[in-house]
Image: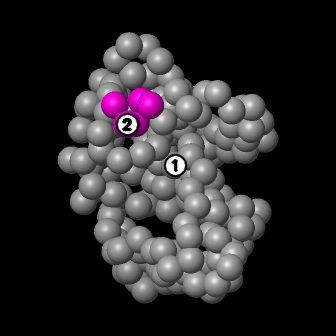
Amino acid sequence: MGTDPQRYLAHLQLRCQHTAVEQLEQLFFVPVAELFSHHFGLPLAPLTSRDGSPLPGWALREMASGGGIPEHCEQDWNPLNLIENGTLCDAALEPAFQLSFLYGVTSATQGGELQISAPETCVPLPPGELLLFNAGCHRHQVLPTSGPELRVVLGGFLRLNRSHTRLHCYV
């Protein structure tokens, strides 16, 4: 999605035009949102932009052969993230609770594992598995992929508001 508000909002408009997105919303995100609400004992509320339009709680992420994501933690990117820096909405989020959730759709032929740096853990994400981890505090990377099969995941970030009364998902 990038760090440009206009590009982010343009992607949202494109996303709203696809029937498949609504199907994935119902088949994937609604059950995941219910799981998170039940597990944490809090309602999951959508985030909205300043103009009142809903912001997406998840995204489909495809990594081509040779792709990877260098080591980081989400706090490294918070100043650039349009939700975290307050560019798109007025959400006040709990800084100590910055989880990522990933659902495996397809695995790369080789590579594409999530490597969490401390302690050193390599986590494959096979199709059909959901992973939730504290990406804000734990340095991690996605290892480079190779081969004809792409690494495809559904996912986003799960956050707690500062008053600890609601959860929010966003991308």
* Residue 103 in picture, x, y percent from top left: 65, 58
Question: Quadrant of residue 75 in the image?
Answer: bottom left
| Residue density around tag 2, few if under 14, some if 14–19, many if 20 or more, within 10 Å | few
The residue shown at (48%, 36%) is 11
Q: Main secondary structure of the magenta part?
A: helix
At numbered mark 2, what does the secondary structure look like: helix, strand or loop?
Answer: helix
Q: Is residue 31 visible?
A: no
Amino acid type, mark 2: Arg
Magenta segment includes 7: yes
Residue 44 located within the stretch drawn in magenta: no
Image vertical order of residue 24 relative to residue 109, above or below: above
Looking at the picture, does residue 31 appear above or below residue 136? above
- Residue position for label 1: 156
* Residue 31 horizontal side relative to residue 40, left or right: right
Lateral position of residue 40 relative to residue 140, left or right = right
Amino acid under disc 1: Gly
Q: Point out the residue furthest to the left here.
A: 79
Q: Residue at horizontal 76%, vertical 63%?
A: 128
Q: Is residue 2 visible?
A: yes
For label 1, the SS is strand
* Residue segment shown in magenta: 6-10
Q: Earlier in the sequence, mark 2 or mark 1?
A: 2
Real-space CA distance between mark 2 and mark 1, rounded to the nearest whole angstrom: 18 Å
* 10 Å crowding of disc 1: few (<14), some (14-19), many (20+): many
Question: What colour scheme was applied to this rendering of the protein?
Answer: one colour
Residue 108: percent from left, percent from top: 65, 77
Please say if 132 is above or below 146: above
| Most foreground residue, 19 or 114 | 19
Q: Which residue is mark 2?
A: 7
